[in-house]
Image (spheres, grey):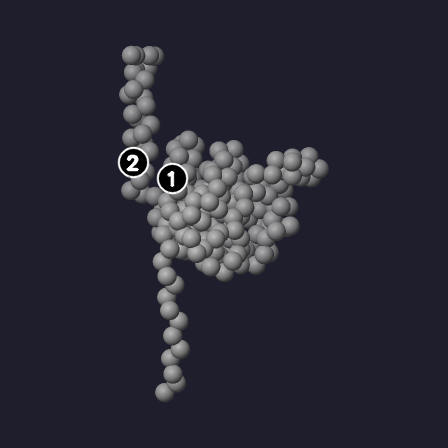
Amino acid sequence: MSSIGGSSSSRSRLYFEELAALVPVLPYEAMDRIVELIVGACREERTIFVFGNGGSAASASHMVCDLNKGVAQSAATSRIKAMALTDNVPLLTAWANDLSYEHVFSEQLKNFVQPGDVVLALSCTGNSRNVLAGLRTARDLGATAAGLAGFEGGAMKELCDVCAVVPCENMQIVEDMHQAMLHSICCSVGECLREPRPAFRLTAAR
């Protein structure tokens, strides 16, 4: 079957070839650091807050589902307290209507975030104003800020303690990679929480 500009199958293949070409250059060290932050927060009974817009909002909700259920099932002795700031639609629209859309995440964080919590912001461009406002509020209140971005990281990169940037300017490709990265992070968190903690040994003074 063919269509204007070539066969539909060849155009589909090009998309996946672009996707596959990014796999070797993904920010794996930054992803590992995000895993460490989440595992540490879980072991200290802290909360992880995740947020983003559009497709990133869907990814935030998806990740929190995976953390709260999937990781809880795989690591029976550890539970994660994770919250997607994208899920309370009445609250989102109330803040957007009465204040501005720029504050829909930051105002929620003011209610809940505590020192030592982890916030994970998702933004393909790294420049979404409400995401940036949320990161600033989180850091002001003592939380650790992490992010997933695309393009060159945008302004978000400077507001994060660790930011995993997909080196791509195709929005759909970045969203695909973010979802795969989040799945990888969740799987790694579950594996870490299944491992026993290193034993603490008191060394006698000599």
Residues at circles 2 and 1 in contact by the CB criterion of under 8 Å: no
In the rendered image, which quarter is residue 17 located in?
Answer: top left
Between 110 and 61, the one nearer to me in the picture: 61
According to the image, label 2 marks what residue?
A: 21
Q: Residues within 10 Å of mark 1 (few under 14, many from 20)?
A: few
Sequence-first tag of 2 and 1: 2
According to the image, label 1 marks what residue?
A: 180
Question: Dot 2 lies on which element?
Answer: helix
Instruction: From the top left corner, tell me how far across and down residue 32 is, in percent.
Output: 37, 52
Q: From mark 2 to mark 1, how far is it between C-alphas?
A: 14 Å
Up the image or down, 14 lies above or below 151; here it is above
Instruction: From the top left corner, tell me how far across and down residue 26 is, in percent.
Output: 34, 43
The residue shown at (30%, 26%) is 14
Q: Residues within 10 Å of mark 2 (few under 14, many from 20)?
A: few
The N terminus is located in which quarter? Answer: top left
Instruction: From the top left corner, tell me how far across and down residue 199 is, in percent.
Output: 37, 69
Residue 112 left/right relative to 186: right
